[in-house]
Image: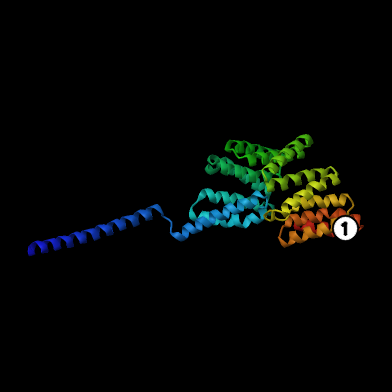
Amino acid sequence: MGHKRVRANTLRSSVGRALRILEFLICAAAVICVAAAAPQPLHEQQEQQSAVELLHHALYLADLYNWAAAGPEFTRAEKMFTAAGDKRNALYAKLGRLRSTAEQGNVRVLSAQLETELATNPLLVQDKQLRMFCLIVKGDIDDEVNSSSMGHDWEQVQALAAELGDKKWQYRALGQLGLVAFYEGDLATARKNVGGALAAGTAAKDAGAQIRFLTVLGTGLVYTKLYEQALPYLDQALQIATATPDAGYQYSTNEARLDAFIGLKQLDAAQALADDMLKHARDQHRMEHEALTLIESTPLALARNDWKGAVSGLEQSLAIS
């Protein structure tokens, strides 16, 4: 009986040791599986998450056409994605960075660079969402280069948006094609397309589209010297921008308002606006808008017989340009 108890105790001890060894092996295997399933250390996962958040917020700002504010976030996200080996999102962020800093570089060179990328980069050939974003960037840049190239860009954006079921970029592309029509002198198509895009953007509560296309309509009326008709569109654009602080300072809208005030001989209002625009441009280091404001202020100086001020403004603009 005693021997049986000893053998039983020995057996229990052996079984206990075996169970402890088995438990250890199971735990070790679990650790190995977890390591295989999550190859990145925790800090790398956190950095990756931060990069995604940066990209999403930059795209949100870009969606409001506040590219200047989005630029630093695109730049940081690009570096983080590149370090993590995420080529797709690194390219996404790079495209945003290029658009955000376009006014600081040679737009013709940049347009040619993007054209080459669209034709040769496998990611841009295969990934329709990424390709559409690249074409959106190129379409904005070609606005400064060539209306024909711009039209081709936005036709492709419109087609891809339809294929992807993206209604927002379908109507936004329509509005941009209206701008192309305006450049080419087809005012009827311009009014139809921009008006349609504005109506769709308003229905969708798309603040970025509303600000942009109200500004386009107002600017078109300013170009045709219908200043009184232009101001309500431009004022409405500013009201929406004020209610959407992330949209930033509206240089294009205010440039059109400045022209309208000068055209209406409202010189005090024009001077106050020009001073405000120059302050914002200089504070935010927006050199292109500083130069444009100085140029557009020349008729204001001339209207006040300030020839010296007119020449000085043009000389400053030339130096900046």
Which residue, as the protein is rendered here, is positioned at the far right?
305
Residue 142: where, in percent of width, then height?
69, 44
Total number of numbered discs in the rendering: 1
Residue 191: where, in percent of width, then height?
77, 38
Chosen colour scheme: rainbow
Q: Nearer the viewer, residue 292 or 274?
A: 274
Position of residue 300 relative to residue 161, above or below, is below
Q: Nearer the viewer, residue 68 or 121?
A: 68
- Name the residue at 87% across, 58% down: 268
- Name the residue at 52% across, 42% down: 122
Quarter holding residue 269: bottom right
**What residue is disc 1 on?**
268
**Is 157 left or right of 26, judged from the image as shown?**
right
Residue 280: where, in percent of width, then height?
75, 60
Give the quarter of the figure containing the C terminus: bottom right
Residue 241: where, in percent of width, then height?
72, 52
Kind of residue indicated by mark 1: Asp
Which residue, as the protein is rendered here, is positioned at the far front?
1
Position of residue 179 relative to residue 301, above or below, is above
Q: Is residue 296 visible?
A: yes
User: For the residue carrying disc 1, how many other residues have a C-alpha within 10 Å: few (<14), some (14-19), or many (20+)?
Assistant: few
Give the quarter of the figure containing the N terminus: bottom left
**Is 89 left or right of 312, judged from the image as shown?**
left
Q: Nearer the viewer, residue 264 or 117?
A: 264
- Name the residue at 69% across, 42% down: 203
Q: Is residue 321 visible?
A: no
Secondary structure, mark 1, is helix
Q: Nearer the viewer, residue 264 or 298?
A: 264
